[in-house]
Structures are given as C-alpha cells and as structure tokens.
Amino acid sequence: MSARFLFLISAALTGCAPDSTAFDSEDRAALSAEPRTFLVQAGTQLLLWGVTDDNYAIYQDGTALYSTRLEHNAQRELIAELGGNTPFVLTDGEVAFVWTNYAPSGSIVAPVSPLIVWTAQGGPQLASMTSIVATLGVAVSGDSRQVAFIANATVDGTTGDLVSADSELSAPRLLAAGVSTDYNTQGTPTNCRPFLGFAGPGRSAFPVAGYCEPGVTNATLSTWVDGVRTDLLTGLALPPLWHADPSGRFFLTTRASATSLNRGAPIVVRDDGTPIVADDVVTSPFFVALNRDGSFFDIALSPTSRELRRVTKNGATTIADLGTSFRLPFHIHNGQGGYFSDFRFVSKDGALLMYLSAINPATGTGNVSLLDVSGGSASPIGVSSNLDAVLSSQPYSADSSHGLFYVVDFNTGLGAFYAANLGGARLLSDGATSAFNNHPGRGSVVSFTERTQLNFTSFVFSTADVAVVDLARAEQSPVVIAEQAYLGHLPSHGGRGVVYTSDHDPGHRGLFLGKL
C-alpha cells in the first residue's frame, strides 16, 4: 500500500445509558478526563457520512440515507432511498449536500448525479437531477441561509449552470448559464472548473464565483449582490481560486501571465473591481493566502527558489525560501467525501506554516518543517526526517498551536500520528503503524484513530479505536473513547463532541455521540 493511500483517503464504549446529551453552556476547551458516550440511533453496519454545525448526523442504514439530531433516541428522517447506489455527502455549516449516485469510473472522478440539499428546517430538497459531484462547485453562506451549486449539467459533465438559492430552495436564481464545469480533466492546462463561494457577513452574504464563460479559457471573478452581477476581474489563472476577507470587501486571486494559464501574479481587488495590492511575481493559484489584516502570503516561483513572502500595501517581505521540492497543506472539509475546502495553507491565526520541506518523488512523502510566519524572516524548524511523512488533511489544531502529520509505514499505508509546534514533535498514536485519520476539536483538543484494522473487502467497514487528546496538556495521554469503531468519526458540538458508528459491542450497536 503506497503512502498516497493515507494521504488521499485522509483521511470499549464507556456507556450508553439514556442520559441527556445536552452540552454544558460553559465555554470550555479542556478535555474531560472521562469522556462519555451515548447511543443516538441503534442499528448494525451504520455508515456516518457527515455532521452539520447544528448537530445533525447524516448516516446510511442499509440502502437508505437518514438524518438524525444528535440526541439519545432522536427521531430520524429519511433523506433518500439509494437503491444500490453509493452516496457522496458533504456538510458545510448547517447544510448537507447529498449526491445520491456517486459512480466514478476510469477518468470520470466527478460524475453527474442528482443533488439533494438538506437542512434541519427544510428537510431534503431536490436541487437538480443533473448536478456534478464536484465539491468546489457547491457553497454555503456563513449563516447557512444561502447555498450555491451546479445544476443542469450535460451528460458528460463538461458544462452546467451556476445557481444560488436560500437553503430551503424556495427561490433558486440563475447566476451563470452553460459555464465550463469539467472537473474530470484537471491535469490539462486549459481546464477551467468553477470555484463557488460566498463573501460577506450574516444576511449580507452574496455569491462569488471564479469560472469560465462558455467557450472561453480565461476565467472571470464575479459577485452577485442583490442579484446584480459585477465582474471584478478577468483573465484569472486556472483553476480560478479566490479568497475573500470577512467583510466581503476585498478579494485575493491570481491573474494569469502572458505565457501560462496556470501561473500568474497575485492581486487584491475591492468589491467594485478596483485593484488594491499586487505582487509582481509569478506564482500558482494554490500558493496565495489572504490574512484578516488585508495582507497576504504568496510563494514566488523561480527556477532556483520558492520564496514565501508576506505582501502588504507597503511592499513585500521574504520570510523564507521553501526550496524547490516542497508540499503545502490544504484543509479538507470534515465531511466524509473530503475536499479542499480551504486553500489557506497557513494556520487560522496566520502565525504557523507546516509543510513538507523535501519530497521523495517515488512515494510523495517527505520531511516535515515548521515555520513561524507571524513576523519577518524566519528559519524553518525540522520535526521529522527520513522522507516518510505526509501532512494531515486536517493540518492544524483549532487553536493554531500545533501542526498535525503522519509518519507512514509503506507496507500498510497507515502511520504514526504526530503533533508538532516550534518546540518539537510529539507522538500521539499508540504504535508506530496504526493511525489513519484525525479531526481538530475545540481549542487544543484533537481526535484521531489508532489500532486501525483495514477491511480490504469492504473498506467502509474498516475499524479503529477513536482517541482524543488535549495538546495543551503535555502530561496527559490520549483517551480512547471507542474501541474498534468504524472508520470515519467526525466532530460535533463545536468540537466538544465526537460522532461515530460501531458494532464492536454486540449489546450496543449503532451511531454514538461522545462528549469530550
């Protein structure tokens, strides 16, 4: 099993009494010495697909997909009958996107499928019979009141419409018709797949998209405020990624160079398209990240160096040369489908960068380094060696204090799970080759799986122990909250809960909530 297996997929019950599963109102980040677990839904071979921010789980029981409030003996709601199909579920905020027929085949990694949008208030609503399983092609506003998605896709998935609506789909609105939606030829230089999102706070949020008009390879960045389209910038580098500040007034993207559709210069524009800050370097759309203060990071590409820079309106400061062989982390969404939901490669507070500082081209693994990016020039600190590490798909703790990574066993595709800060690395998992995936909890708490038993006949029924640890407590060992649960646990209750399914205890099988 190759190390890429871990990278691409990373991705004993203590009580099941019918106690209240309500969480304390006190805003605590510390991990309880004895986390408690509660049975939410009884059943065997249940598959957890997602958890929403308002604490509903989306799970599969046999050939049906259900939602349930994360309370003991809650009433479940049918979302869809799947027949023999495999669903693809993505949760964002209080919304679940459910593609009911995920059937990749050969080069088709983003097949056309019916799309259901689910919310607790509106229940399951059919968004389109022909959407594309393309997770960068859906979005939810910060308050979960609005959604955007691809509808009316062609059979081959190459074109479709961009649509926005309220999250209950009572008033869909066409944003752009017949745009390029080909997510299946991502290796080609001219491939232009849309990047949908929202900008702005609360009820003031509005749809934003980087996309290509029909028959055009140069991408456009557009906003739709009160239904009025404004093109902020044309000629974006591909893929047409963008970042917005919390106010929705400033946007960072990359304008393509004259010689490459996939490289260009980073630029910040106002919400009316007025340029604010630009950096006269060549970089990739993946190598820029906007900060809350309006500054941004970019990586200047040259034949001999890869300079990480912080750019402000007063100029650019070089922080460090990352070297010509490196790999950045990307935040993958907590839903089981997994996608690059956040292309910001530094920690949330903008102070820490974890990256692979050298790459073994045969395995894709490398050495882990940390960099203090909060100020000026800094020296990388190496925390692993032997070219055998991969970065976690959930690369930082919620409080930004630690980076998270794995040292891989090339024979199994599993690894040892580590947390690291500028003071060094700490082994968290029990055993050198047993860890599989992890999620940040509240503050410095992290959950992860260990003692993994892979099921190569039916991978979704692989099992592992689910453990939690508070990284702020160096003296505290990880606490196992579930033995041999099915892979795919997810956080809930703002990181104070962990949801999982298990058949380990014959007397208590089903979907469980662990209170941390």
Image (cartoon, rainbow, N blue to C red):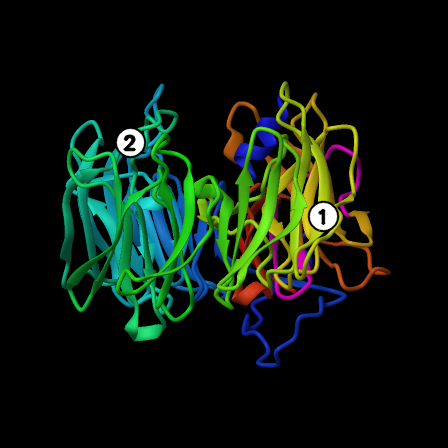
Which quarter of the figure is the N terminus placed in? top right
- For label 2, the residue is 111
Q: Position of residue 220 (x, y in %)?
A: 25, 47
On the picture, is 195 further left or further right than 315? left
* Residue 212 rendering spot, x and y as whole percentages: 23, 40
The reply to whether callout 1 and callout 2 are in contact (CB within 8 Å) is no
Residue at disc 1, secondary structure: strand
Local SS, label 2? loop
Characterize the magenta stretch by its predominant secondary structure: loop
**At label 1, which amino acid type do we have?**
Leu
Residue 370 is at least partly visible in this image: yes
Disc ID at residue 423: none
Mark 1 residue crowding within 10 angstroms, few (<14) / some (14–19) / many (20+): many
* Quadrant (top left/top right/bottom left/bottom right) for the C terminus: bottom right
Q: Nearer the viewer, mark 1 or mark 2?
A: 1
Amino acid at the residue labelled 2: Pro
Q: Foreground residue, 40 or 355? A: 355
To which quarter of the image does residue 76 belong?
A: bottom left
Query: Against 364, is 241 above or below?
Result: below
**Numbered badge on residue 370:** 1
Q: Position of residue 365 (x, y in %)?
A: 66, 29
In the shown orientation, is residue 395 left or right of residue 286? right
Range covered by the magenta-colored residues:
428-446
Residue at far right of view: 475
In the visual, does 391 lie left or right of 42? right
Q: Tell me the residue at 50%/65% (across/down).
A: 72
The outermost residue toward the bottom is 26
- Residue depicted at 51% across the width and 28% down the height: 458
Distance, label 1 to label 2, CA atoms, is 38 Å
Residue in front for this viewpoint, 75 or 103: 103
